[in-house]
Amino acid sequence: MTDFSVMDSVNIPLFEGISREERGMLFGHIMPTVREFDKDEIIIMEEEQIRYVGIVLSGRVNMVREDLWGESVFISYMKPGELFGETFHIMRQKQSGVTFQAAEKTRVLFLSLDNIMHPCSHHCAFHVRLADNLYDQLGRRNVQFIEKIEVISKPDLRSKILAYLEIQAEKQGSSTVNIPLNREEMAEYLCANRSALSRELAALRKEGLIDFQKNRFTLRKSA
């Protein structure tokens, strides 16, 4: 039997407003499973038929896409509590247009979206709440993609870095933020190379616009 106790320490917006007891009854209908993945392990391959959606319980999942020349393009990432695969599942042609890959040792909760979209015959209130939460998460995913477009549409790397950090500062409610990306991943997210990113970060720190220690960044007021 799958142990779902790990979810007690993770904030999962999909289950917002659903009590632990109701969640237990809900799982009897949607039959979720939990799987673990090692770093760099493929979770869902591009063009694969998506039958389940995933919720990150621990670790991180990267969304990448292979271009015409076989190069991987880093699109986005999902942190604990966040969904992935739901956008492609609700399409009539349920094929993934991207690859989902574990960025580190990662634990994922899988559940059938069909069982969420088509509630049981009892019309349980918590099942209806789950469907409402799903639509809210779809909206939030669109916002994330808009944020990515906002960042990479900036005219230069400096503006992209500051825009990305400002978005993270707003989300975390602090001028000092922790980002989940290493330098290589951050460079890919900003559509830059790692050397150029390192040079620009060093220049921004020298000018007093930012400070950082590994993945912890502080935006100065003058930025």
Image (cartoon, rainbow, N blue to C red):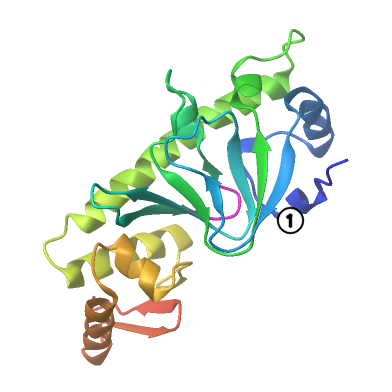
Q: Position of residue 210 (x, y in %)?
A: 31, 81
User: Residue 167, percent across and down?
Assistant: 34, 59
Which one is in front, 36 or 16? 36
| Residue lying at 77% horizontally and 51% vertically, measured from the top left | 8
Q: Using the rendered image of the protein, determine whether residue 80 is visible from the camera's viewpoint.
A: yes
Q: Would residue 16 be visible to someone looking at this image?
A: no
Question: Does the stretch in magenta take in 96?
Answer: no
Position above or below: 82 against 175? above
Residue 128 on image: x %, y %: 64, 20
From this viewpoint, which residue is outermost toward the front?
A: 69
Q: Is residue 133 above or below residue 42?
A: above
Vertically, is 59 above or below 26?
below
Q: Which residue is mark 1?
A: 9
Q: Is residue 33 left or right of residue 59?
A: right
Q: Give coordinates of residue 109: x percent, y percent.
A: 68, 43
- Position of the C terminus, as image quadrant, is bottom left
In the foreground, 195 or 213: 195
Q: Residue furthest right?
A: 1
Provide the major secondary structure of the magenta segment.
loop
Q: Which residues are magenta?
A: 78-82
Residue 161 horizontal side relative to residue 39, left or right: left
Q: Nearer the viewer, residue 59 or 153?
A: 59
Residue drawn where x is 77% and y is 27% of the image: 26
